[in-house]
Amino acid sequence: MEAAAVTVTRSATRRRRRQLQGLAAPEAGTQEEQEDQEPRPRRRRPGRSIRDGEEDTVFREVVSFSPDPLPVRYYDKDTTKPISFYLSSLEELLAWKPRLEDGFNVALEPLACRQPPLSSQRPRTLLCHDMMGGYLDDRFIQGSVVQTPYAFYHWQCIDVFVYFSHHTVTIPPVGWTNTAHRHGVCVLGTFITEWNEGGRLCEAFLAGDERSYQAVADRLVQITQFFHFDGWLINIENSLSLAAVGNMPPFLRYLTTQLHRQVPGGLVLWYDSVVQSGQLKWQDELNQHNRVFFDSCDGFFTNYNWREEHLERMLGQAGERRADVYVGVDVFARGNVVGGRFDTDKSLELIRKHGFSVALFAPGWVYECLEKKDFFQNQDKFWGRLERYLPTHSICSLPFVTSFCLGMGARRVCYGQEEAVGPWYHLSAQEIQPLFGEHRLGGDGRGWVRTHCCLEDAWHGGSSLLVRGVIPPEVGNVAVRLFSLQAPVPPKIYLSMVYKLEGPTDVTVALELTTGDAGSCHIGGISVLNAETSSRHSLRPLRVPPTKLARWVGRCGRQLSGGWVQHCYEVSLRGCLLLDLLVCFSRPPGSREEESFTCRLGEIQVVDAASLLAPLPQVQAVTISHIRWQPSASEREGPPALLQLSCTLHWSFLLSQVRCFRIHCWGGMSDDSPGRELPRPEMPMFLGLAFATQYRIVDLLVEAAGPGQDRRMEFLVEPVPKEGFRVPQAEWGRAVLLYSAPA
């Protein structure tokens, strides 16, 4: 069913083809090349027509219940939802070439700038995510309905994220890549061989000449580059012949060199398994038997059964590359290990004592082995015990926008308006997470502030940040540092904070920031209370927002739906570095008693004032393809009054300017499925979020067309700018589907 849609936007499709061919060009004379070089007549499926030259692209479809086959690798066979995938063999790896369907799995988020950079020699923290075989609910690219999903949100403590499974080529699900990149964390896939079958695979590409192993390395680099992740963990869990093990170092060197050329900041790590003789013999340390592999790539991930004497011996082996040795810690505490589970801090204490990096393997133990109802409490307990051994990194670019959404929730909220009820889970929708933990004041410790994830209420997305605390009598306020930044700032910035205080209280809430480069930094503007007097600045909300910025600050200073309040701030800076964002809670004037408070934070924004005035490009060339019709599941006999429509939308847009796209429709019907939108006839129906320029609509309930009738569906693509404001509906992309019953 794709041919007609392709002809509507042939230039856009050709652009996509050229992008794909840039990474894996087809051989001369292939069909793909011929289609780009030779004009071809327009082909139409019987029953469909396309009207050009109108404001909206209109597609005509005659309803048919014949299946439209979709490639099994890219779509869930039961629902046709797009899924992330892996490769199971050497043959699949070497045969891989990018297709249009691969676009679903390409990460939208580039790796965010961070300080210190990953290349610094500060000891790092690697998280190796191994959970129940992998590709669980996280494989659904557009999200799924999950009651109690796994969530990770301590990203500021992590430097490298490895997605691990026992498939030969583990390509990280795109949701993990988007979320990690948003936090400045690089993402690795896994290339693993195991058992006798793994031995045969290794012999096939390593025992011959260099062309064989270079072909494998080239394909791994192409996959990394195409899907926008950052590199590979190489894990050879089988013995190698002398010929194969002899070619392993050149393979690693070639892979590492090519990856560095094609993927800035790319990383290749070797897992402690095979030794130089070709035997499978875990060493639990870097030593003379495996040093050759360490010397051929970016880092070494040790096995888990080490003792402190192993760490002491490694000091001489690692030399100046101590930070490139990732000492493995099995959180499940399997085997003869130090620490693990809630004693994992004991492992980290020894590792950091000797200056090595750490590789936390399977910290999902908290989710897999403990009560799901206590997950967030146990997750915070686990990471809280490690906090002093996990140096954080800082975000160093603007705009900075977060609603604290975890990418999950019991309902979905859009700027204070509830738009869907029911559990949902969408990894790519997780926004930048703060520094979690408990912060106590000095002295008797009566003053404290704690931060927690909160799924009970949200301003935008599915969750908010719950902040609880106590202001002791002897101080006027307490503050919590939420974000560590090292961001050069433009001459003028606007800041916004959405919050809600619980219960009767006179405590006031204010946004604060700290700046660096004190010698040259000058800060002022109508929101700054203590301009140029210190590096920490309290901010006063704007009384009247600038009229030019109405689309961004139109809600400032007003009581919003659900009890939320928004404050906006204007700050002028010169020669400054923005270092921290804090929220300060102050006691009411005249109060001398202990004051407790509970506050929910719904959103914080820091944006360049000039960027808010820049025009946003329009979504263009929306097409509809891969249409599938089914009778409604509730109707068993006779002509159906209701149908289920599935189809794929494609469009064109400059991805560097958006956080995501919101997909809507006119003409669909709400049903009782979890996560469906609440009926709001004055608004189009929200369908979901897209983090690519394509979206698969699945089983949308629509009315069947009667004899001689046309029914109309209109699909709308709303871009969400990085600055976080709403785009007027007139600037959304759209396409119309007219459908009729067969004659």
Image: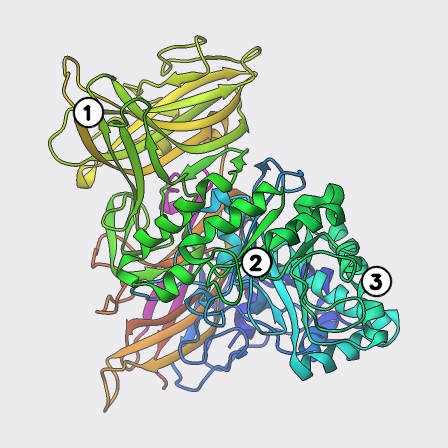
Q: Quadrant of the C terminus?
A: bottom left
Task: Residue 528: name its quadrant.
Answer: top left
Which is in the foreground here, disc 1 or disc 3? Answer: 3
* Residue occupied by mark 2: 162
**Residue receiving disc 3:** 250
Q: Secondary structure at mark 3?
A: helix
Sequence-wise, the earlier of marks 1 and 3 is 3
25 and 423: which is toward the camera = 423
- Against 560, residue 714 (above or below) is below
Question: Horizontal and vertical percent for residue 702?
Answer: 29, 72
| SS of the residue under disc 2 | strand
Residue situated in front as seen by the camera: 577 or 7: 577
Tell me the kind of residue under disc 1. Val
Boundaries of the magenta span: 710-737
Q: Which residue is nearer to you in this view: 98 or 235?
A: 235
Whole-number angstrom distance, CA of label 3 to CA of label 2: 23 Å
Residue at 86 percent of width and 76 percent of height: 208
Task: Using residue 587 as the reference point, say whether residue 113 is left or right of it.
Answer: right
Q: Looking at the picture, does residue 183 appear above or below residue 629?
A: above
- Residue 252, given in percent of the width and then of the height, sits at 77, 61
Please tell me how crowded label 1 is: few (under 14), some (14-19), or many (20+) other residues with Cα within 10 Å: some
Number of marks: 3
Residue annotated with mark 1: 507
Q: Residue 217, percent across and down?
A: 76, 65
Kindly identify the amino acid type of the residue bearing the numbered disc 2.
Answer: Val
Q: Label 3 crowding class (10 Å Cα cut-off): few <14, some 14-19, many 20+?
A: some
Q: Where, by quadrant of the figure, is residue 681 drawn? A: bottom left
Q: Mark 1 to mark 3: distance in Å?
A: 64 Å
